[in-house]
Amino acid sequence: MVEVEQLVKVFPTTIGGEKRAVDGLSFRVERGEIYGLLGPNGAGKTTTLRMLGGLITPSDGVVRLNGFDVRERPDDVKRSVGYLTASTGLYQRLSPRELLHFFGELHGMDRGAIERRVDELIGWLDMKSFADLRCGGLSTGQKQRTSIARALVADPPILILDEPTLGLDVMTNRIILDFIRAEGARGKTILLSTHYLDEAETICHRFGLIYEGRLMAEGNMEQLRAASGKTRLSEIFLKLCGQEQHVLAIGGGT
Amino acid sequence: MKLRRVWIVYRKELLEALRDRRTLIAMVLVPLLLYPVLMIVVAQALQVEKARRERETYRVVVETDGLRRWLTAVIAADEPPGSESRPATTQPGKRMTVAGHQFEIDLTSEPLAGAVRGGKVQLGVSVEPAVPERALGDDKNRVVRIFYDPSEYRSEIAMRSMQGILARQTDRLIATRLEKAGLREDVLRPLDVDVMSVASPTKLGGALLGQILPFLLVIMTVTGAIYPAIDLTAGERERGTLETLMAAPVPRTQVMAGKFLVVATVAITSSALNLISMGATMRFSGVAEAMTRTMPGAGPVSIPTAVLPIVLLAMVPFAVLFSAVMLATCSLARSFKEAQNYMTPVMIAALIPAMVISYMPSVKLAGPVMVMPVANVVVLLRELFAGRYDAVGIAMTFGSTCLYAAAAVLGAAKLYGQEAVLFSDVGSYKTLLSRRFLKPAARPSATGALLLAAVIFPLSFYWQTTVATPSMSPGRLAGMTISLMLGCYLLPPLLVAWYAKLNLRETFSIRMPGAWTVLGTLLVAATCPVIAVAMSHWIVRMLPQSEEVSRLMGQQEARMLALPTWLLLLTIAVLPAICEETLFRGFVLAGLRDRMGPLAVCVVVGLVFGLFHADLWRIPTTAVLGMVLTWVCLRGGSIFPAMFIHLVNNSAAIISTKFEWLARYLGTGDGHRAGMLCLAGVALVVGLWMIRPRPRGAFAQ
C-alpha cells in the first residue's frame, strides 16, 4: 500500500527564491490497485514518484510504502518498490540477463532465486530473443521490456512506473499494458504516470489529476465523470485542471 | 558497510569496464605498445639524423688564400679520437670529412660576420697574425676567431666540430714545441685526474631511471584512470542509468566504494603494465647500453628489476588518491563532455608537481615534501629506484596519501547522489555549498570530518617541519605554536561547524560528565602519562635515534624549557588540550562515530591524531594516547574529560623537570620496572571502564 499525506517538495533556486514542485499532495493506493497519476509537463508527477522511490527527500509531509516511512527506512522502501524511470537507460555493455542478475543481487536475492525469477520474466515479457545480447544494441521496445523486468526482478509488492509506454510501438505497448494489468491482478500496488490518457483510462482503477504540484481531482472514472460532466479522461482532465478554455482558445474552437 | 554489495557493484562495473574498448586501449594496449614503439621510433629517428649529418656539408669561409691552405692542411692532419673517417682530399674548395662532418672551405671578400649572418655559410675563420704556409707553423702564438650563428643549429654543430679540430691542432703544436725544447710531453700534466665511479651498475641504472620513470608513471597512471572515472560517474548519469541504480536498495557510499575500487584497479593495473612494459623495453632494446655510453667512466648500467615490485607498491596510494579525486570531480559533472572538461585541471594538478620535481633532482623525501600530494610519490619513486629506503618518508607518504584518498572517496560519495547532481532539473550546484541552502544538522558528515582533517594536515605538517626552524628563539617558537593551535586546530572546526549549521553541543560533545566518568577520568589522567613515558622509552629503544636527531630534539626541548613556566604550560599543555581536542575528539570524532563501531572509530581517530604529530618517534605514543582520549570522549559523552587527560599528560612532562618526585613517578629517567607498569596499565583499564555516559545523557541514545 502507498500512503501520501501533505507531501511537499521545495527546490531552492539560485536567485534566492523557492520553487514548490509538489505542494501538499495526499493520496492512497491500495493493494491490487492501479493508480494513474496524471498531469501536464511540470505538474510535479516525476518529482512525486522520485520522492516515493526514495531518490529525493521530501521537504515536508509523510510518505509510507508498504508501511515504511521513506525518510526513516529508505532502504526498506527501496526493497519494497520496483521503480521504472522515465528514461530507458540501461547498461550498454551488459546483456538483459546480466543486468537482471545484477539488480537481483543488489536486492539480496540468492543465485537460485535470481535464475528462476529471470527466466520467468524473460518468458512473460517475451525477451528470449534478445536476453543475451548487449543492451546497447536493443530497440526502444526491447529496452523498455528489459527496464520493466529490472523493476520486477525482486518481485516487489509495489510498482512505480514513470511513463512505461513512452515511445513504444503498438506491439510492445500491448505486451507492457497486459503485463501491468496482470501484475495488478496478482495483488501488486501499482502507481503509474503517463501522458497517454486513453491508455490510462483502460488500465487504471483510480486517477489522481495533479496540476502545479497540487491534486486537482481524484477518483475512478465514474466519480470523475460525475464531477466534470465529461465522458473521456482527456476532457475531464482539461476541465478539472481549469485549462479547457485555454486549450479551446489556442485551437480556435467555439 | 556491507562488503557484499560493494563487491557486487565492483564486479559489475569491472565487467563493463573490461568490455569497453576505450578502457582496454588506455589500460592495456597503450602501455604494452607505447614503449617498444617509442623506442623503435626514437632509434630510427636517431639513425636518420646521424645519416643526415654525415651527408651534410658545412661551408667555411676565410679571407686569404694562405689561411685557406693552412686550414685545409690542419683539417687533413686531424685525427679525431674514435673516428674512422679520414679526410677525402686536401685540395682547397673540395669536401673533406672530419669526425663525421664534411667541410668545404672557400674564400670570401665580404666581412666574415656578415657572411655567416647571411646564412649561406656556417662558419667564418680568421687568424692573427697571418699563418705560415706549413701547417705546423713557427713558434708564434696566434688568435683564431671562429664566427658562427648560435641561433642556427648547423652553424652551432660546425663550430663545435671546428673547435675540436683546432684544439687537437693546438695539442700537436704543443707536442712539437716540447720536443724542440727537449721536454717530455707529460711535463704539462703534473696532475692526472682519474674519476672513479663507486656506484654499482644497478644503483647507477636506478638513479638514471629515477630521473625519468616517476614522471612517466604518474602520467600513465592518471591517463589509465581517467576514462573509467568519467564513464562510471558522468557516463552513467548521461546514459540514464544512475537514477535506476539509486533506486536500488544500496547506500550511495557502497555504490561509490564499488566504483572507486574499479577505477583504482584500472589505475593500478595500468601502472603495473606500464612498469612491466618499460622494464622489458629497456632490458631488451639496448637502452641500458645506451645509458652506459652517456656516463663515461661510470661502468655498465643495469636496470634494477628487483626494485620494480616495490615501486609498484609505492604507486598504489597514488593510484588510489587520483582515482578518488577523479571520481569526486566527475561526480559533479552531468555529462561525459562536462567531466572531460573537469579532468583538465586534475591532470594539470598531477602533472605539474610531477614535472617540476623531475627537474629538481636535489629534492629529498623530507620536510613538507613528505606530505605534498603527487610530489611525495614522485620523490619516493626516485628514492626507491636509487635504492634508498627511508622508513619515515615512506610512512609519511603512505599515511598522508591514504588520508587524502579517504577524504576524496567520501567526498565523491557525498556528491554522487546529491539531488542537484542527480537531476539537472531540481537545482544547481550552488545549492550544494551555499550556507543559505544547507540544512541544520546535529553533527558533521564523515566526509566533512575527513576533508577538514585532510586540509589541515599538510598545513600543520608544513608548520611543524618548516616554519618552526631549529634556530628560532624560544619566544618566537611559543608564538608560532600558539598560532598553530588557534589557527589550525581550533578556528577551522568552529568555523566549519558554524557555516554548516551544525549543532555545536552535539558536534563538540559539550556536556557535563557524570560522577563515574569524573572518577574514571582522574584515574586515567593519573596513569596515562606513566604509560606514555614508558612507551616513548620503548620506541626509542626499538628505533634508535641518530645523533643528529637526538641533538636537534634536545636543542628544541632546551629552547622550550627556557620559557617561563606559565607560558610553557599554556603552549605545550593548555592550548593543545583545548584546540587539539576540539578538532580530533570534537569535529573528527563527531563525523566518524556514526560510520563505524566504537573500537574502529577509536583506532581511526587515534591514528589520524598520531599522524598529525609528524615525528616517527612520537607517532605511536600519540596515536595510542589519541585512541584512549577518543574512547573517553565517546564513552563518557563529553569532551571535557578528554581535554583534562590531555592537559595532565602534557603538563606532567613539563612539571617533572621541576620536581624530582614527579619525574620518579613518571619514570622519565631510567623508566619503571615491569611490575609498576602492569599496575599502571590495570589502573588505566579500570579508569576507562569507569567512564560511562550519564544515565539520561542524550549522547547514549
Image (spheres, grey):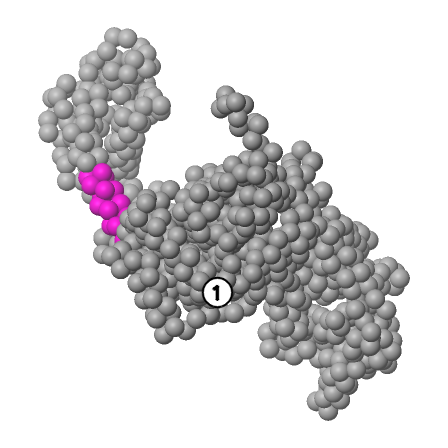
Is B244 situated left or right of A225 in this image? left
Q: Is residue B581 left or right of residue B188?
A: right
Figure check: A155 above or below A59: below
Give x and y (percent) for residue B454: 62, 55
Badge 1, how many Cα within 10 Å: few under 14, some, many 20+? Answer: some
Magenta stretch, residue numbers: B30-47
Q: Please say whether residue B34 is one of the residues in the magenta stretch.
A: yes
Q: What amino acid type should be assigned to the residue bearing mark 1?
A: Gly
Describe residue B123's horizontal placement relative to residue B614 as left or right: left
**Chain of the residue displaying label 1:** A
The relative height of residue B44 versus residue B394 in the rendered view (above or below) is: above
Q: Can the viewer see residue B97? A: yes
Magenta portion: prevailing SS class: helix
Q: Secondary structure at mark 1?
A: loop
Front-most of residues B590 and B487: B590
Is residue B154 found left or right of B365 in the rendered image?
left
